[in-house]
Image: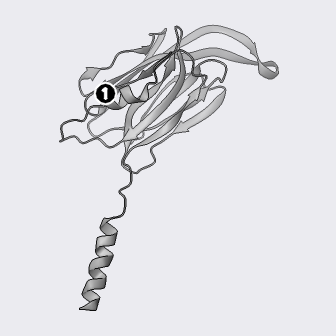
Amino acid sequence: MFLILVVTMFLAGCLALPIKDPYSYSSAVGQGVGTPFASYGEGRITGVRVWETNNNYYYYYYYNNYNSNNYISGFQLRYGNTWSPVFGNEGSVKQVMELFNDEAIVEVSGKYNPADYICYLVLTTNMGRTLSAGMPNQVSFNFYPTNMGNELRILSGRFNGAGITSIGAHWGLVDMEGAGNSTLETALETVTPIY
């Protein structure tokens, strides 16, 4: 009888353990000036468009290094069948990736210039495909979900008139059968107002 009581108490204690938060956030990198943004939509991300600007000139930068002045000028995500607004602006070169069924973005990486823009952006899927845009120079970053099975839900950050100045990633589970799978409320909570 005592053994049954001990086992019951143990199992009840296990049920009382906190459930791990199914969402995670990769903190934004970059200068972070300009208008805040956060992508939003219903369902899973099914497509990506990224615009890069290539000014075709070189400028003098720290420590006498010459760096190409390429940067990410804007991007757009498709949730289900609906494209989000363009965050930033449409630059000169557009890269597009349509995701397959059951394909999800599981890594966001690239390079940023602490003095101005996101220089290079790479989106990697669970099927090993990548979309890359920009020029791979400056400071590296690598975002991925904390929890297994999570995927990219929201990209947030800031942009100005020329391009994306900072970017962060929000990860979570996608309930394909349940209603209320919108990222709009989370996106609105993420963006801090400019005063």
Front residue of 89/64: it is: 89
Quadrant in which the N terminus is drawn = bottom left
Front residue of 127/151: it is: 151
Which residue appears at 56% of the width and 24% of the height?
Answer: 120
Left or right relative to 144: residue 149: left
Above or below, comparing residue 26 to residue 115 in the picture = below
Q: Residue furthest front?
A: 195
Q: Position of residue 121 (x, y in %)?
A: 52, 27
Residue that badge 1 annotates: 184
Which residue appears at 26% of the width and 79% of the height?
Answer: 8
- Place residue 97 in its image quadrant: top left
Which residue appears at 33% of the width and 26% of the height?
Answer: 40
- Place residue 13 in its image quadrant: bottom left
- Residue 105 seen in the current view: no
Front residue of 90/116: it is: 116
Above or below, comparing residue 84 to residue 150 in the picture = above
Q: Which amino acid does label 1 sit on?
A: Leu
Q: Position of residue 5 (x, y in %)?
A: 26, 84
Left or right relative to 120: residue 60: right
Which residue appears at 62% of the width and 33% of the height?
Answer: 140
Q: Position of residue 65 (x, y in %)?
A: 77, 20
**Disc 1 secondary structure class:** helix
Q: Position of residue 136 (x, y in %)?
A: 61, 26
